[in-house]
Image (cartoon, rainbow, N blue to C red):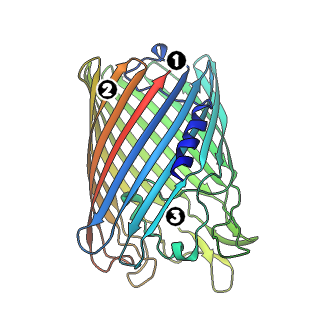
Amino acid sequence: MGKSVWLAGFLCSMMFCVSFAEESVSKNEIGALTVSATANYGTWSSIAGDNKGSQGLAYFQAAYDGDGWGLAATGKGANTSYKTVLSEERLEFTTLTDTSVSSYYSHKIGDLLLRGGVDLSLPTGKHAYSSSELGRIVTDPLSQDLMMLNTYGAGTNVIPHFMAVQRFSDELTLGGGLRYEFTGSYDPTTDVSNDMLDPGERLMLMLNGAWIATDNDYFLLSLIYNYSSVDKQEGTEIFRTGDMYSLEVRYIRKWEEDFNSIFSLSYRQQEKNKMLSEGNVLNSELSNSNNNSWEAYVNNIYRYSDDFSFTGMAGYKQVFPNGLNEDEALFDGGRWKAYVEPGAMWFLSPVNYLSGKVRYSYILDKKDAFASDDSGYNVFNVDIGYTYSF
């Protein structure tokens, strides 16, 4: 399987895709074709109890950025291995994930920029699990903070998208857009027949705004709404994910020519799901099983020289308990996470650079169905990447 991962990366590098250079490399210095490879390795373990695991990821991308249009392809591979107190056996597998292909075309009319395209998600990843594997998978939302990747495959998805951005003045720009995902069906299990899953189609609406207060102060605002239609299994409606709303405010401060900071504050809220009742009718939950959350971080970028840039991020995330009672099976007590992430970029030339960063996170997961007591987790990640533009 390891050879398959590298083969997928090679094939992706032969395709065109869209990629944006780092902000320290100007647009007119880079070529139209960019290829990049990134690897990430992470480990996590609970301070009390025997919950621990690791995940290795490899990303391969090739990018073509033409005059007002572009195409993109990204291939990924993953090795996931962990064991928890809920299972005597370790869950471990190596797999490709679904391959992403994206496109865009943009057109400018005066101060109005129109941009649209179609993305594809191709089913090259792991989407089916055995009953034994399903019994070992961590379904608790905590897994979202322990590992970078928790979903490895699905069906063929077609995703058209469109955005319009209007510049009203030198200081104010507003935009809006939508993204609609036509989801393909797939078999979620390897040893159960007649259980084809047809996920609900997904709609995302977005509003953005940018305000330049001074030459050194910028404010960005983003509002996002996500809607999903009903999931079906063998034609029967079984579930609908609750609507999700998110808000993010960013403040960018240019302290000096070579030193910038980004401050971010975001909030996410999700409504009740709908699921099958005892009478096989799709009804809304009596209490909300989804968690709301907020997160804040600061990211600093310092251009030390023409060859080196240093980055540093620190953040905090708070996930609130869901609306269920403590004695209910899907009760989640919430959690908080604090993290720091130093990093650096080495510019071998204006079009050729290496990047690296490390992250340490501490998570305190409150007691719930996954753990009978509050539990702390240490999470470590190392990330390295290489990018070249032709």
Q: Is residue 72 left or right of residue 368?
A: right
First-in-chain label (1 vs 2): 1
Residue furthest to the top: 28
What amino acid type should be assigned to the residue bearing mark 3? Glu
Label 3 sits on residue = 271
The residue shown at (49%, 75%) is 287
Give percent across and percent down for residue 240.
62, 66
Q: Residues within 10 Å of mark 1 (few under 14, many from 20)?
A: some
At mark 2, the secondary structure is: strand
Amino acid under label 2?
Answer: Trp
**Residue identified by numbered label 1:** 31
Q: Residues within 10 Å of mark 2 (few under 14, many from 20)?
A: some
Of the numbered discs 3 and 2, the one sitting upstream in the chain is 3
Packing grade of label 3 (10 A; few <14, some 14-19, many >=20) is some
Q: Are marks 1 and 2 in contact (CB under 8 Å)?
A: no
Point out residue 177 in the picture as x, y percentages from the top left corner.
60, 38
The one nearer the camera, 374 or 89, is 89
Task: Tell me if residue 131 comes above or below residue 311 in the rendering.
Answer: below
Q: CA distance from mark 1 to mark 2?
A: 18 Å
